[in-house]
Amino acid sequence: MTRPASTATAALRFPAGFLWGAATSAYQIEGAVAEDGRTPSIWDAFCRAPGKVHLGETGDVAADHYHRFREDVRLMAGLGLTAYRFSLAWPRVQPTGRGPASPRGLDFYRRLADDLLDAGITPVATLYHWDLPQELEEDGGWPARRTAERFAAYAALAGEALGDRVTQWTTLNEPWCSAFLGYGSGVHAPGRTDPVDALRAAHHLNLGHGLAVSALRSVLPAGAQVSVSLNLHALRPLTPSAADRDAVRRIDAVGNRVFLGPMLDGGYPEDLLADTAHLTDWSFVRPGDPAAVHQRLDWLGVNYYTPSVVSATPEGAAPAREDGHGAGSASPWPGADRVGFHRAPGERTAMGWAVDPSGLYELLTGLARRHPELPLMVTENGAAYPDEPGPDGAVDDPERAAFVHAHLAALHRAVADGADVRGYFLWSLLDNFEWAYGYTKRFGLVHVDYRTLARTPKASAHWYARVARTGTLHPPGAA
């Protein structure tokens, strides 16, 4: 594949077999939280804690995908998608987080997978997208080692039940958020604020991932593929100073290498252990854990939205907190909580995140240099904008189409420069429950009227459909 002279106007052709997808998560779209045996998750509990979620909104109904999945699969087929990345709700599949699976919960995902396959769409199932059964949180949550062991048992149940339909599996989605926003800053469920618990959770998520990979491979047919999706941080120093470059190193350690090290290299980086030695001796890492975590992956999922600009904080000064993870909250950066975060330059999305596709290029090419044997997928990338229907009912969202075009052009450049990227999943298929922001942020290709639950594909969806059908990236508005 050759690089064109200008990605602003030229049509860019992607490799044959490239997966064109969209992504969702169970708690954000399914609803039906008390139907067919599903029990509460940590997000059901968190949403009901005063002041945690905008206006006390919940995922009780969300986009009602549980009842409308067939309509949603028809929408995907109409958009020309070749893959759909969704998550299984752990408390729907295994309501208490232990013991046998729920037949009704499994049947929902069987029906979904069957409809996807009938439409020619590859199902890509994520085992965990943040909805830990509340009963397991009350038994210690991710800081407890037994949660990793129970996750492996759940993985085996799901793989055995659905492996005849689903051949693409992801263990965890964004374990950094689960560990450090859930147990460090407390802005995500379950809302704890203990830096040592956050580090313990990170390790047990790593361990759960490794045990789940082994469990899946023990029950899945030959040819099935197993992966993990990480929200890797593209980092820039505020200045070229040695202090700011060390701030980048610290955030890279606790934001990226805390997962990349054990999963891909077989151990935690020494500088991370040194940075956090005042908090813990890491004795929760037991002999044999590094080998259990370090499992072969068929591909690595990369989630990217915006870069981070960081600096050292002068002694006695409060660190700048433009990190997008809850101003005024506890730090989600144990060992680096004195690092300052600054507003990146450029236009911004409704989340306040800078639009900078070069961060995606840097992540993909950097991973390709360090692990050339490992295929990559962009498993989340997208933007929130305040989309509303016009008088004619159409939803015009040129900013989203421009955002996706620019990031796909960066991905194309990364492939031209040697990165083995196999697919792209736009976040998200549907407008949905956006965690602590409730229903205030719209990421979807498809507009959802939260009063009627009517779906309306946005202008960006029609543009993306052309890209998916042709495998060619044309600028938005091009003939």
Image (spheres, rainbow, N blue to C red):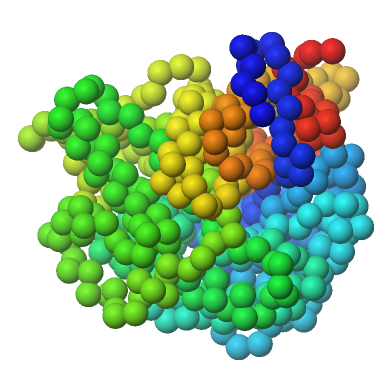
Residue 305 at what x, y percent from top left?
52, 35
Q: Which quarter of the rendered picture does the C terminus lie within?
A: top right
User: Which residue is depicted at the point 21% across and 57% down?
Assistant: 270
Which residue occupies the foreground of this view, 90 or 188? 90
In the picture provided, is 379 more to the left or to the right than 316?
Answer: right
User: Which residue is depicted at the point 42% across and 75% down?
Assistant: 292
Q: Which quarter of the rendered picture does the N terminus lie within?
A: top right
In the picture provided, is 307 more to the left or to the right than 6?
Answer: left
In the picture provided, is 3 more to the left or to the right than 202?
Answer: right
Residue 193 at what x, y percent from top left?
31, 58
Q: Is residue 112 above or below residue 146?
A: above
Q: Is residue 458 above or below residue 175?
A: above
Residue 386 at what x, y percent from top left?
64, 26
Q: Is residue 473 above or below residue 258?
A: above
Residue lying farthest bottom?
99
User: Which residue is depicted at the point 77% across and 81% down?
Assistant: 103
Count of numbered badges drawn on the protein: 0
Which residue occupies the foreground of this view, 290 or 446? 290
Q: Quadrant of residue 225?
A: bottom right
Residue 324 at what x, y percent from top left?
41, 37
Which residue occupies the foreground of this view, 1 or 331? 1
Q: Does the image show residue 347?
A: yes
User: Which residue is depicted at the point 75% across and 65% down?
Assistant: 166
Q: Quadrant of residue 439?
A: top right
In the picture provided, is 210 more to the left or to the right than 19?
Answer: left
